[in-house]
Image: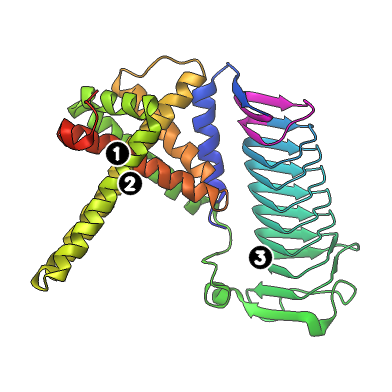
Amino acid sequence: MRFLFGLMITSLLATVAVAEEDDGWFSIGSDIFRASQSVSVDAAGLSDLFLAGETVVSTADIVGTAHVAGRFLTLSGRIGGNAYAMGQKVALTGPVAGNVTLLGQEVTVEAPVMGNLRATASELAVTGDIGGYALLVGEKVALDGPVDGDVTLTAREVDFGTKARIGGKLILYESSPGSVTVPAAVVPAERVERHLSDGWDQDRGYGMRIFSWRAALGGFVAGVLVIAGIAALIALLAPEMLAAMRRRILDRPGRTLGLGFVSLSAICGAGLVVALTGIGILLTPAFLVLALLAGFFGYVIGAYALGVAVLRAAGRHLPEAIGDRALAAGVGATLAGVIAMVPLLGWLFVLALVLTGLGALAARLLPDHLSGTPRY
């Protein structure tokens, strides 16, 4: 669970900057995409939701998955798939048939969850029935509902309510042994495993720590600013080149992605072939660095093109000033980070974004007869 509070707040700021007072939305089939300062969804017959805004309220019953990011979030409709939400205050008051992943400063789960619950917050309260396991990370955690599976919990303050019940094991990480009192009515003592908080990473292997939104906020904001700054530098040094790469990505995304795949494969393959010569193995690190740099700049270019597409969907003009182009890159990088939270599909999206950006860069650097298409 690496998507913490900094990601939520940064996503919110970028979304509000893009949407401003307008309601930018579109739909594909029964899936709906909406971004605005205030978003409310109550339509029937929807499949998946992709919502972003300062205030987001969804009362719609959906058969698919909900992806929500913003500041104040309320999900009260029935969700037939999974739910992913990130915000300052997140309230889940509608039942979920699948798994739930929530991240925020204040998170409350009041509705039943048929699957697993994974939640990270500064203040976390769970009162709904959980059908699977629960992974709870926070500063203050309150559990006042039944959990059929195991509960893995780490927090500075823990409160078990009168309705709290754990059907499996309670794996508890605490600052000192026995510092957290676990009532026998919640779970028998023989099913309680106690560990020191310092051993969280080593024991679980999740790379998780007690929630610290300041560190998360600083890290994510720094990443977005780096992407935006590099895009602004490219716009300053080569504005026409950046605009041409953006046009290629938006006009021919599939072909550009394919060219990026071939380009990255060529770099990695060349490193392998050179290594086969024996003495050329000394150059392998150089090819690795080249591949990493190509992927990084591909991400910058891809994020910029994604940000431009989102800005245009929200009704804004094409970016011409350096500041507008930096904003587009920041919005794209933030949105890519939000989408990356989706298991498997999020990673595939980011990979496609990197390859597409790299393909646009390769098309500009390679001769026309090698790229197979004229330059823009």
The Cα atoms of the two marked residues, 1 and 3, are separated by 48 Å
Label 1 or label 2, whichever comes before in sequence order: 2
Marking on residue 359 = 1
State which quarter of the image contains the C terminus: top left
Question: Between tags 1 and 3, which lies in front?
Answer: 1
Pick out the residue farthest to the left: 279
Q: Residues within 10 Å of mark 3 (few under 14, many from 20)?
A: some
Q: Can residue 174 be found in the magenta stretch?
A: no
Marking on residue 261 = 2
Q: Can residue 48 be found in the magenta stretch?
A: yes
- From what the image shows, is residue 215 above or below residue 225? below
Pick out the residue farthest to the bottom: 190
Q: From which residue to which does the magenta span run?
A: 30-55
Q: Amino acid at mark 1?
A: Gly
Secondary structure, mark 1, is helix
Secondary structure, mark 2, is helix
Judged by its main secondary structure, the magenta piece is strand
Secondary structure, mark 3, is loop
Q: Amino acid at mark 2?
A: Phe
At x 19%, y 27%, the residue is 238
Residue 104 visible to the viewer: yes
Marking on residue 156 = 3
Residue 327 visible to the viewer: no
The answer to the question of whether label 1 and label 2 lie on touching residues, with beta carbons closer than 8 A, is yes
Report x, y in % for residue 341. 55, 48
Report x, y in % for residue 261. 33, 46
Q: Nearer the viewer, residue 208 or 58?
A: 58
Q: Residues within 10 Å of mark 1 (few under 14, many from 20)?
A: many
Report x, y in % for residue 23. 60, 18
